[in-house]
Image (tube, rainbow, N blue to C red):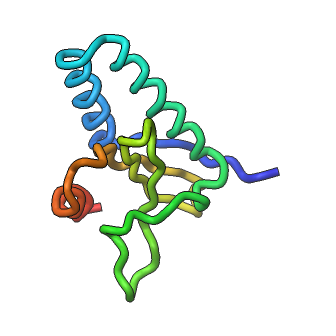
Amino acid sequence: MAETYQIIVANTAKKDINDILDYLQENVSHQEAVDTRQAILSAIRELETMPYARSPVKESIKPTKPITLRQIVAKKVYRIIYRIEEVAKDVVVVRVIHVKRGKDYVKRAIRSL
C-alpha cells in the first residue's frame, strides 16, 4: 500500500485559487467557476498518494540542486505547483498558475519558495 501524505495548501495557493475562481465567476460563468474549483481540488487530492510521480517544475530546475518543486495540471490549464516535505509526509501546494502565464512570471512566482 502506498504511503499517504497530508496535503497543506499555502496561503499563496489559496489566493491563486480564489483569484482564478473570482475571474471565472465574473468573466465566464458560475458553472465554469464551480467546475474549475472541483477540478483543482480533485487534482490536489490526488497528491495524497505518490506525489513523486508528477513532473518537476522546469523553471525551478538547477543542475547543482535536487528537484524541489513538482506540478500536476488541472483542466489542462492550471499548474498546481507543490513541494514534498518527506520527513513530515506533507505535500505543500504553493502556487496555482494558469499555463498561459509566461516562463518569467512562473520564475518570479516561485523564486522565494
Tell how many labels: 0
- Give the answer, above or below, for where 59 lies relative to 14: below
Compare residues 72 and 28 and report the one nearer the observer: 28
Counting from the top left corner in percent of width and height, residue 98 is at 28, 43
In this rendering, position of residue 91 left or right of residue 35: right
Q: Nearer the viewer, residue 20 or 113?
A: 20
- Quarter where residue 112 is shown: bottom left
The residue at 41%/40% (across/down) is 9
The quarter of the displayed image where residue 45 is located: top right
Query: Where residue 94 sits: x, y (%)?
Result: 35, 49
Q: Position of residue 64 (x, y in %)?
A: 38, 88
Quadrant of the image occupied by residue 18: top left
Depth check: give the residue in front, 102 or 52: 102
Residue 9 lies, with reference to residue 30, above or below; the image says below
Taking the spot 57% from the left edge, 46% from the top edge, the residue there is 47
- Image-based side of 45 in relation to 34, left or right: right
Q: Residue furthest bottom?
A: 64
Q: In the displayed image of the protein, which residue is found farthest to the right?
A: 1
**Residue drawn at point x = 39 percent, y = 63 percent:** 57
Up-down: is 40 above or below 12?
A: above
Foreground of the two, 89 or 108 = 108
- Looking at the rendered image, the quarter that the C terminus falls into is bottom left
Could you say where residue 62 lies in the image, as x and y percent from the top left? 35, 80
